[in-house]
Image (cartoon, rainbow, N blue to C red):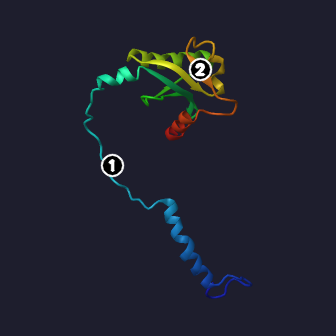
């Protein structure tokens, strides 16, 4: 630009300098300014006992359930609403038998610890399970809708 090598070019050296002042610093912001910080590794995890009153107050809970795919591998993702416990379980195929088996396994984990699941919140892909889950309430979202709580959890995992 300084020597006029490009004929009939409306851009001047001042235009290039203004561009560098305005736009080049933003590239570093987009790439990130952080340097490699050393993460502190937690060596020892202290286990705490759950207070006795907690089980009495929260004997019933509700589950949000949806699919999750990681590298094209299917998982079922469930999140308890009151005690905020997340469970992710991989399954081989996406069919009603595998869905039911996974949901029963997750429910059994809660039952083994003294909790009962009073309701399930799912999207439309689990509609076939409505009659198979028995007396438990199942709340199915409308077509093309998702349960927001579990959908946010899936975005966090991905």
| Residue 71 position within the rendered picture, expressed as x and y whole percent measured from the top left | 56, 35
The quadrant in which residue 142 appears is: top right
**Residue at 59% across, 76% down:** 19
Q: Residue at x 56, y 12 (%)?
A: 135
Q: Which residue is mark 2?
A: 138
Residue where numbered disc 1 is placed = 39
Find numbered disc 1 in the image and state the secondary structure of the residue it sits on: loop
Residue furthest to the right: 8
| Residue 54 sits in quarter | top left
Image depth: mark 2 or mark 1 in front: 2
Secondary structure of the residue carrying tag 2 is strand
- Disc 2 crowd rating (10 Å Cα; few below 14, some 14-19, many 20+) is many
Is 124 in front, or is 93? Answer: 124
Seen from the viewer's position, the closer of residues 66 and 56 is: 56
Q: What residue appears at the point 48 percent right and 19 percent down from the top-left corner?
A: 117
Q: Is residue 77 above or below residue 11?
A: above
**Can residue 70 be seen?**
no
């Amino acid at each position: 630009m300084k020597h006029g090598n490009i004929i009939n070019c409306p851009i001047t050296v001042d235009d290039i300098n203004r561009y560098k002042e305005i736009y080049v610093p933003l590239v570093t912001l987009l790439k990130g300014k952080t340097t490699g910080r050393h993460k502190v590794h937690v060596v020892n995890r202290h286990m705490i006992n759950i207070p006795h009153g907690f089980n009495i107050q929260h004997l019933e809970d509700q589950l949000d359930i949806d699919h999750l795919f990681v590298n094209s591998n299917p998982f079922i993702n469930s999140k308890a609403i009151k005690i905020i416990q997340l469970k992710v379980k991989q399954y081989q195929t996406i069919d009603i038998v595998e869905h039911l088996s996974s949901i029963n396994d997750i429910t059994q984990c809660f039952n083994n610890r003294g909790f009962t699941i009073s309701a399930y919140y799912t999207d439309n892909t689990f509609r076939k399970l409505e009659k198979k889950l028995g007396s438990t309430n199942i709340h199915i979202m409308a077509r093309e809708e998702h349960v927001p709580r579990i959908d946010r959890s899936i975005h966090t995992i991905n």
